[in-house]
Amino acid sequence: MRSNNNVLSLAGLILAAVWTGLFAAAGEPADNAVASSQSNPLSPKLHAKEAGAAWTELTSANHHPPPVPPEWNITPPTAGEREKFYLPYIEAMADKSRDFYTRFPIDTNAAGAKLMEFQLLLLARQWGQTNQMPRIEAVGNLLLNDPAMSGERHFQILWTMALNSPPNKARPLFQEIINGAAPDKLKTAAAVELKKLDAVGKPLDVRFTAVDGRNVDLVRLRGKVVLVDFWATWCPPCVAEVPEVKKTYDQFHDRGFEIVGISLDKDKDKLTQFVAAHKMEWPQFFDGLYWQNKYAVQFGIESIPAMWLIDKKGLLRNVDARADLDGAVQNLLSE
C-alpha cells in the first residue's frame, strides 16, 4: 500500500486489473468469443481471426477467471496456494495479449494489449516467476516507444520498469524521470527511490528497543542474513504475506536467518495482539507515527510492504526481496 503522496504506479493497479474488466471493450462480448475463451483458458493464442473479435475474446477472457477449487469454500487458501493456482492463467492471459498486438500491430487496441501483458507479467514476477524480467523489459520498451503511451503514461511506465529492475538498470530510469517532463510527484518519488538505491551496499543504522522489550542492533546481527520488513497490520497486502514470510523464517532461521519488523502501525495493542496471534517470533519496532515512522522516513519508505535484505557482512543487498524472498535469502546464506 502506498502512502498519502498518491504517486500512482502501474504495478499498483495489477491486482485490480486482473479479471475485473479494466481492459473490457464496450458492450457485451460475443457468445462465440466467450465460449472460445472459456473452453481453453490456458491457451496462449486467441482463436478469432479478425481484430475486433480477437479484442472481444481477449477482454472476455479477462472477465472470466477460472472457477476456484471447491475446497476453497471450506478452507480459504493461503496467499501461496492462491498464487500457484492462478499463475498459469495469468501467464496464458499475458501470452494472449502478446498474440493480439503481434497479429494486429496497428489496431487501436494494440497499446492496451501491450499494457495488459506488461501488468500481467509484473504480477507473475511478483508471484515468484523471476525469469520474466527480460520479457518485462521488452514489452516495457515497446510501450515507451508507442505514441499512445506519451506524456504522463510514458513516465509511469518508466517508473514501473525502474521499480522492477536491478539497481544498475533502475538508476538511469529514475534519473530519466527526474530529468524529463514527468509530473512533480513522480520526480519526487524517483528521487526517493534513488536515495534507497544509494543505500545498497552500505550498512544500515537500525537500533531500537522492540515492543516486547528486546534490544535490537543490526551491528550485533553480523554473520546472519537479516530481512528488514516494513509493514503494518492495517495494510492488506502486508497481512496477506505474513504466512509466506513466516514460512521463510521457519525454513531458514536455524541456518542464520533473522527478521526485524518495522511496523507503521498507530495502535500498539493491535500490533502486539496481531503478532501474538500469528506467532511472529521476530522483534518489532513501533513508534506509532504511521507514515512518519522513524525508519520509514530515514530510508524513504513510501509504500508497504517493503522488504530489504542485509547480508552477513551487515550490508544492504536487496531492496526488493518480495519478488523471490526464499531464493534471495538462500543465495545470501550460501555466501
Image (spheres, helix red, strand yellow):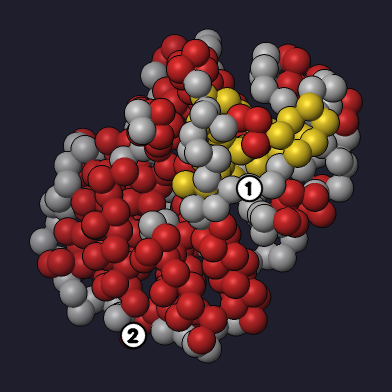
The residue depicted at 75 percent of the width and 15 percent of the height is 276
Mark 1 or mark 2: which comes first in sequence?
A: 2
- Specify the amino acid type for callout 2: Pro
Q: Quick check: 283 left or right of 142?
A: right
Residue 285 image point, x, y percent: 77, 35
263 vs 183, nearest the viewer: 263
Residue that mark 1 sits on: 204
Q: Which of 45/236 is in front?
A: 236
- Disc 2 element: helix
- Image side of residue 334 versus residue 304, left or right: left
Residue 308, given in percent of the width and then of the height, sits at 55, 43
Residue 28 percent across, percent down from the top left: 38, 56
Front tag of 1 and 2: 1
- In the picture shown, does residue 183 fall above or below 24? below
Task: Locate residue 60 relative to residue 26 in the image: left or right.
Answer: left
Task: Choose between 159 and 72: the one closer to the eye.
Answer: 159
Quarter of the view holding residue 57: bottom left
* Crowdedness near tag 1: few (<14), some (14–19) or many (≥20) residues, C-alpha within 10 Å: some
User: Which element type, helix, strand or loop, lies under badge 1?
Assistant: loop
158 or 22, which is in the foreground? Answer: 158
The reply to whether callout 1 and callout 2 are in contact (CB within 8 Å) is: no
Within 10 Å of the Cα at label 2, are there few (<14), some (14-19), or many (20+) other Cα atoms?
A: few
Q: Residue at x 74, y 30 (%)?
A: 216
Asked if residue 261 lies left or right of residue 93, the reply is right
Res 192 visible: yes
Label 1 to label 2, Cα distance in Å?
42 Å
Count of numbered circles on the image: 2
> Would you name the residue on which mark 2 appears?
147
Q: Is residue 146 above or below residue 113?
A: below
The residue lying at 31 percent from left, 40 percent from top is 129
